[in-house]
Image (cartoon, rainbow, N blue to C red):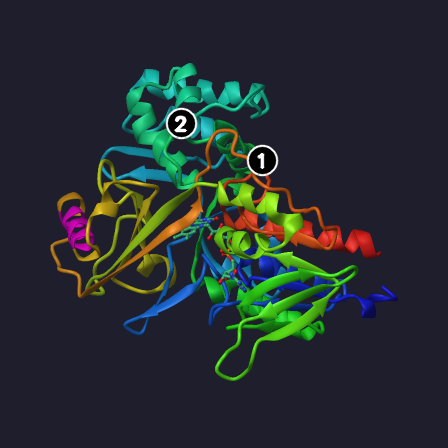
Amino acid sequence: MSNNKNYHVAIIGGGYSGMAAAVKLAAADIPVTVFESAKQLGGRARGVRHNNVQLDNGQHILLGCYHQTLQLIEQVGGNIEQDFLRVPLQLTLHNRFELKAPHLPAPLHLLAGLLSAKGLTFVERLRAARFMLALNRINFSLPQDISVFELLSIHGQGDELIRLLWEPLCIAALNTPINIASAQVLLHVLRDSLNGLRSDSDMLLPRMDFTALFPERATEYVKQHRGTVLNTSSVEAIIPHSDEIELITRPTAESTAQTKLFSHVICAASPIAAVRLFRTVPQLALIAEQIAAIPHQPIYTVYLQYPKQVRLPHPMLGLDRCFAQWLFDKGQISGQHGLIAAVISAHGRHQNLQHELLAQKVAQELYEQLGIVEAPVWHKVIAEKRATFSCEINLPRPPHITQLANILIAGDYTAGDYPATLEGAMISGVLCARTILATIQ
Ligand SMILES: Cc1cc2nc3c(=O)[nH]c(=O)nc-3n(C[C@H](O)[C@H](O)[C@H](O)COP(=O)(O)OP(=O)(O)OC[C@H]3O[C@@H](n4cnc5c(N)ncnc54)[C@H](O)[C@@H]3O)c2cc1C
């Protein structure tokens, strides 16, 4: 590109969507500056240190169909087979249910897995397989959105089938209870994960923390391409001028408030921060109110450090009717022996408990369900109260473009096929970068 020297793109937020946009623009030789208010990058997918042990703010899982995410990780120097433990499609609720997809091409692997699933009656297995065939026939597309529960009921999925298979799957994928969750968004995830290549349904469990996995590598990449990444640099105001955008950053101990001018701005901050920034810009006031109306759901992660010999029967294991919905054995995943991460998604009774008591209850479940008699050496509960948007029926989500051609929005909550996921965030960041590139090339 010949005349890029006139362009300088500011990106507010160094989470996955912001860093995705930064990498794509940097790769096209556009100078970028990323402003991240926190000390470290990653946003809702970031590394956290506790007791000298590397944790994340929450256990994350990727799917093989997250093509954009995997491509970007590789673009900045990652190696998918080394960075992740790859687990072929397998869903196990301890002592209650097991679905294991055999080595067949998709979607036969799923159908065969459903027909041989343990814990269901013959009729239930048949109904589940027929449901998948029916979804295939309608191309995973509904004439109008309904709740996941309604869709399952229409297709005769019965209480046990819902409880053991579809509800845990929906909560894990959408972080939203099935009675309000969008069936159409779930179908997008099922379409992409179960109906493409067999490897698209693989579960990828990261062996490293989420700041190291992508944002740190992306920073190196951006710096090598004339870009800048500023941590502890909070944008406090956006002021549009006729052909430039002025950003005001918060004063720090070392510097006073600074203003900077840019040709374009991508706001890749969390929804709550985007609302704060947009409300003071008259042209963005409407979009600010649309974002403010988006409901949220929490995710709690209870880390329990046991003696090193403690391990689970699988790297990832579900529990039925427990506080802990999914358990992850960090020993098998990342060599952190004895460390178990228990994930509790969406609203629920766990939110009424003190963290200390919640950790005790989860440890008790591990004892009762799995016979782990050892006591945890330490525990850490991380409650992300606004972990994701609540992925509800027909939820209005803002587009990536705004009334102002040179201000764009990236983030997992912007309009797209996916629920709040890393893939949704990465796709939105890339879309913003492509939109800017299309206008200036
Ligand atoms: C506990 C938990 C578990 C999850 N599990 C999964 C999972 O298993 N699989 C999956 O795909 N997804 C999962 N997600 C969702 C996934 O983490 C998010 O979809 C994704 O990280 C969102 O990225 P983002 O860039 O859109 O937003 P964010 O990560 O929120 O990034 C926004 C960034 O902007 C910064 N910022 C805010 N205000 C300002 C400002 N004024 N100036 C400068 N910077 C600012 C913030 O500090 C933050 O770094 C999980 C989320 C949580 C919380």
Residue occupying the point 44% across, 27% down: 112
* Residue holding disc 2: 114
Identity of the amino acid at label 2?
Leu
Q: Position of residue 367 (x, y in %)?
A: 14, 49
Classify 10 Å Cα crowding around label 2: few (below 14), some (14-19), many (20 and above).
many
Front position in the image: 134 or 296: 296
Q: Work out whether 2 lies above or below 45.
A: below
Q: Position of residue 35 (x, y in %)?
A: 58, 68
Residue occupying the point 30% across, 28% down: 163
Front position in the image: 204 or 413: 413
**Mark 1 in CB contact with mark 2 (< 8 angstroms):** no
Q: Earlier in the sequence, mark 1 or mark 2?
A: 2
Query: Horizontally, is 410 left or right of 42 in the view?
Result: right
| Quarter placement of the N terminus | bottom right
**SS of the residue at dot 1?**
loop
Residue 363 is one of the magenta-drawn residues = yes
- Alpha carbons under labels 1 and 2: distance apart: 17 Å
Q: Work out whether 173 lies above or below 53.
A: above
| Quarter placement of the C terminus | bottom right
Query: Horizontally, is 263 left or right of 55 in the view?
Result: right
* Residue holding disc 1: 196
Q: Work out whether 431 lies above or below 321.
A: below
Q: Name which quarter of the figure residue 142 lies in.
A: top right
Q: Position of residue 290 (x, y in %)?
A: 55, 41
Q: Position of residue 50 (x, y in %)?
A: 31, 69
Residue occupying the point 56% across, 57% down: 277
Q: Main secondary structure of the magenta part?
A: helix
Q: Name which quarter of the figure residue 141 lies in.
A: top right
Q: Which residues are magenta?
A: 357-367
